[in-house]
């Protein structure tokens, strides 16, 4: 490896011609390049020469995104891929854990033997009091109370899951999402910013409730939302859907980010067999974004039962990919959309408001459309 | 070391893919892969070579159609900008391998030995390819300049 001290500014002028014509030895070339990296005057002097190699060098004079190094470090720290050092560390931890378990087991045996000698029992259940034996009636009552509590828990879970969720589905199971307050924000970003969005969320300790083809849904507090709007390049602003959001204080909020594809004009899909042959849907494994379409509907009306809406979608042949209180993300064939709109109107008594209604007329009738419906309910 | 090398790798990826977002992703992935492998020297030139090798492969796999973007040259004076534009255009008219060898040598200033390990070719082949690529680039630039006049 060439020594940085082996070349100085005077040498630069002397060896300049040879450098530009790539006639230096490897060691001299490296020393020359290192000096240019470290000496701004020589760098400016050399780059001013109008040579072909300098043109290519100049093409490297681009501004680096400010967050590049922090993204690299973040990815490195959060990556699941094991490294050699983490393997070694893991093995050490496992070894210590095994030793600790062995010591604990040995200690337990020793103590158990000692206690046995003293005539005491170590095996007690939580329900049985130590001092006096429990009467039979109490035991039965306790068992009954536990059973009742268990059934109440079951009922509670059942209420949370919208009706129809347990019906057999053609696609992957919709994840169950726990109840959250209904305070909404939504915004738009380009799909190319997806990675940056997810990285930023993770940095803030936020894990999406759902990540789909063109939508990311997550829950967080108002403080994080303010941080996000400062960190992320969004197309729109983080808008409130209702007055109650502004007055909700620091309660949990749900944020919906629509990821817009840059392809505005739907391409020719005549060669796409999935769309041609099926009445239904493009496979979820299709990663070619140019053959999938999105509509984002904001149904700003009151819908009595979310289960009715999701059942309507399924009855028309749609597939629900994700739902939580107030959000349904699904896919449906374009030609069924009008029927769905009519159903929504009859369910809610109000017409659905569509974010990009005009675009659906440009899609082929049998095209699969990804739709997300966001609505409020009282 | 990351901060010192990231500019060079980003510039390399940007010039090979002509897409800032793709260059960003490739740069991040290349550094992560290089650092996770543990297979690098602490010497900057060697590390740069490892990361550049990964980046070139990722660029080769994910190459997209080139499209000139004026935002690549925001702060340059007008006469130089024209020549750089021609240079960039001409570069993207070459094959990927020619682009890679030119950028690795004349932009990143890697040694022949390093380039040889990045592109997995013998040093002598690299030298020959580089000479030929420079000739082709010169021709393309002259052609573009004369077409523009």
Image: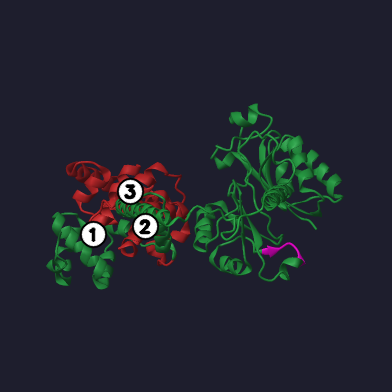
Mark identifier at residue B11: 2
Q: Which residue is mark 1?
A: B42
Please check whether the numbered discs 3 and 2 fall on a single chain.
Answer: yes
Q: Which chain can be seen in red?
A: B
Report whether mark 2 lies on the same chain as mark 1: yes
**Gap in Å between the C-alphas at discs 3 and 2?**
14 Å
Name the element at disc 1: loop
* Residue B70 lies in the magenta-colored region: no
Q: The disc numbered 3 marks a residue on which chain? A: B
Q: Which residue is mark 3?
A: B54
| SS of the residue under disc 3 | helix
Provide the chain ID for the residue under circle 1: B
Q: Position of residue B30 (x, y in %)?
A: 36, 52
Q: Is residue B98 above or below residue A240?
A: above
What residue lies at 28% left-to-right and 65% top-to-bottom?
A47
Q: Looking at this view, is A173 or A270 the one in front?
A: A173
In the image, which residues are magenta?
A239-243
* Label 2 or label 1, whichever comes before in sequence order: 2
> Which sits earlier in the primary sequence, circle 3 or circle 2?
2
Mark 2 vs mark 1: in front: 1
Tell me whether marks 1 and 3 sit on the same chain: yes
> Which chain comes out green in the rendered image?
A
């Amino acid at each position: 490896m060439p020594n940085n001290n082996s070349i100085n500014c005077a040498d630069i002028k002397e060896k300049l011609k040879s450098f530009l014509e790539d006639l230096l030895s490897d060691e001299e070339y490296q020393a020359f390049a290192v000096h240019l990296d470290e000496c701004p005057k020589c760098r400016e002097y050399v780059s001013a020469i109008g040579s072909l190699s300098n043109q290519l060098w100049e093409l490297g004079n681009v501004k680096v995104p400010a967050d590049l190094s922090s993204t690299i470090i973040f990815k490195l720290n959060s990556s699941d891929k094991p490294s050699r050092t983490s393997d070694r560390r893991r093995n050490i931890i496992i070894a210590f854990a095994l030793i600790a378990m062995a010591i604990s087991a040995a200690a337990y045996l020793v103590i158990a033997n000692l206690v046995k000698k003293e005539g005491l029992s170590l095996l007690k259940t939580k329900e049985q009091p130590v001092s006096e034996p429990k009467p039979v009636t109490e035991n039965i009552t306790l068992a009954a109370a536990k059973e009742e509590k268990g059934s109440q828990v079951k009922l509670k879970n059942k209420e949370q899951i919208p009706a129809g969720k347990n019906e057999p589905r053609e696609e992957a199971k919709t994840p169950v999402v726990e109840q959250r307050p209904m305070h909404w924000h939504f915004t738009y970003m380009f799909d190319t910013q997806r990675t940056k969005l997810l990285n930023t969320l993770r940095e803030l300790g936020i894990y999406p409730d759902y990540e789909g083809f063109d939508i990311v849904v997550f829950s967080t507090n108002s403080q994080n939302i303010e941080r996000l709007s400062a960190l992320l390049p969004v197309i729109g602003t983080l808008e409130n859907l209702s007055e109650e959001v502004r007055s909700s204080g620091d309660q949990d909020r749900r944020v919906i980010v629509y990821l817009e594809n840059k392809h505005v004009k739907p391409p020719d899909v005549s060669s796409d067999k999935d769309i041609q042959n099926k009445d239904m849907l493009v496979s979820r494994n299709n990663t070619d974004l140019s053959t999938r379409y999105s509509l984002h509907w904001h149904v700003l009306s009151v819908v009595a039962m979310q289960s009715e809406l999701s059942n309507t979608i399924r009855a028309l042949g749609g597939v629900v990919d994700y739902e939580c209180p107030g959000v349904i993300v699904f896919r449906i064939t374009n030609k069924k959309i009008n029927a769905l709109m009519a159903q929504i109107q009859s369910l809610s008594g109000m017409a659905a408001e569509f974010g990009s209604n005009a675009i659906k007329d440009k899609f082929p009738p049998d095209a699969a459309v990804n739709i997300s419906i966001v609505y409020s309910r009282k | 070391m990351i901060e010192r090398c990231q500019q060079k790798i980003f510039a390399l990826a940007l010039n090979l893919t002509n897409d800032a977002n793709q260059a960003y992703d490739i740069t991040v992935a290349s550094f992560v892969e290089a650092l996770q492998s543990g297979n690098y020297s602490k010497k900057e030139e060697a590390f740069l070579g490892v990361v550049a090798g990964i980046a070139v492969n990722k660029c080769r796999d994910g190459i997209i159609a080139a499209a000139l973007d004026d935002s690549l040259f925001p702060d340059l004076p007008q006469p130089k900008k024209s020549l750089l534009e021609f240079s960039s255009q001409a570069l993207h008219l070459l094959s990927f391998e020619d682009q890679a060898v030119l950028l690795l040598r004349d932009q990143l200033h890697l040694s022949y030995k390093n380039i040889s390990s990045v592109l997995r070719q013998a040093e002598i082949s690299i030298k020959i390819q580089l000479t030929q690529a420079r000739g082709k680039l010169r021709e393309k630039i002259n052609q573009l300049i004369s077409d523009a006049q």
